[in-house]
Amino acid sequence: MESWTFPPDYDPGYMPDPGSRYWFPERETMAAGDREAAIIKRIGEVMGYAYANAPFYKKKWDEAGIHPDHIKSLEDFERVPVVTKAELRQSQADNEPFGDYLCVPESEIHHIHGTSGTTGRPTAFAIGRDDWKAIANNQARVMWGMGLRPGDLIFIGSLFSLYMGSWGTLIGSERLAAKTFPFGAGATGMTARAALWMQMTKPKAFYGTPSYALHLAEMAEAEGIDPKEFALDLLFFSGEPGASIPSVKNRIEELYAAQVIDTGTMAEMTPWMNAAGTKETDGMLLWQDMVYTEVCDPKSFARVPWGGQGTPVYTHLERTSQPMIRLVSGDLTHWTDGADNPCGRTYPRLPNGIYGRIDDMFQVRGENIYPSAIDGVLNEIAGYGGEHRIIITRDGAMDELLVRMDAKEEVFAKGAAAIAALQAKAEKELGTVLGVRAQVEIVNSDTIPRTDFKARRVIDDRDLFKSLITGKGKA
């Protein structure tokens, strides 16, 4: 396998032939069994390295009676205890600031990123100098698979802050020798300026979130610019579900007359493009020689069979700083063996991408509902304005589901009958897909705020109801 060493040592001057579909033909198209044999050998190296350098892993594995020398097969590897985000936060609380799973001296740290900490203690990502170079090579390799080439202009329309997505795209673009426009997002008036710049520069590709791409198209049209004038070939996304939801994907492709490619796993797992689609293959391939991914039962953390649904569990194969070994994602997906991948790569595949988080699921009247399912229904309905909120409440003893959706201006221009027809259609379609009645409220397109980043659409006020009936609410 090309450049298959640990630690990795990529040639910074290497570039495939421009006509090649593959960055590394052998690694990307080898027989699955041969790749698995190489992966289990690499897992032994990575575990041995972590056991020697990270007290976090040594303690965890000793307590479980696991030693790196015990792991002789991928089935053996399923016995290795998983790592949770809560454990990482606790490790960093006890061993500030980077935790006792940092395997390199602090002097070797090149970049520090992290989570926002809006739901608790933020997690710090310490990335070593050599790892940063390896990540750039990996991201460039995946972007090559999307059809991007040296000299192409890549417009990055996402936040440059703690968020790893922007930075990973930037360094991948630079390694690819592309023309990179790190425009960013988030400032007032920035989206209208982005539309103007894209109209002027005609980038080959755009990176951001699906929500922001829809917002950008809406803002461009408000400025009198047709998004098709950007002349994009492709848009690739991470950060939230959407790019593999057919109705959302199709809507964006129609707005821009460009291909949509889904990418991305977790910031902790950077190179986060370790799951990504290609120019020829929809959904997301699992680039197993960068990050070994298992789709596992959420309770036993044993791999589910091909075709099964579960949560991804990730293991770094090329990271030396803060390597993650069997990190539970908490996301939801299903996988296939990838034997029918149109691009010819022999990686397993997530045909529908990562379509939600297990903890995003909510129940209404006994039915399990994922926000991405509602997203998919609304984006197929003519007249939907592009934004909505999901409000879970309680009326008497029963949970109720209200979907507040905005409508295009032409719906309101046609009057009350058109609004009522849209409401009825949305309620019928949601009921069919979700298996539970949903009330729909139609509002003007300027009622619900748009987002410059990840969409947050679920509002659960059942806790308020509970607090009121138990008397435990705030005075």
Image (cartoon, rainbow, N blue to C red):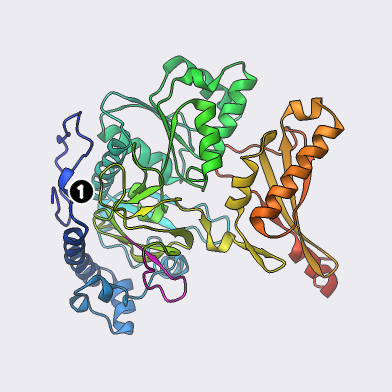
Tell me the chief SS of the magenta region. loop
**Crowding at label 1, few (<14), some or many (≥20) Cα neighbours within 10 Å?**
some
Q: Which amino acid does label 1 sit on?
A: Thr
| Identity of the residue drawn at 61% across and 21% down | 221
Residue 186 pos. (x, y %):
55, 35
| Residue 302 sits inside the magenta stretch | yes
Q: In which quarter of the image is residue 192?
A: top right
- Image side of residue 149 versus residue 334, left or right: left
Q: Which of 11 and 149 is in front in this view?
A: 149
Q: In this view, does 409 lie above or below 96?
A: above
Query: Which residue is tagged 1?
Result: 29
Whole-percent x, y for residue 102 in the image: 31, 62
Tell me the quadrant of the picture where the C terminus can be found.
bottom right
Q: As drawn, is 119 to the left or to the right of 290?
A: right
Q: What stretch is highlighted in magenta?
A: 293-305
Query: What residue is drawn where x is 35% and y is 53%?
Result: 349
Q: In this view, does 353 lie to the left or right of 78?
A: right
- Looking at the image, which residue is at 42% across and 17% down? 201
Q: Which of 308 and 268 is in front in this view?
A: 308
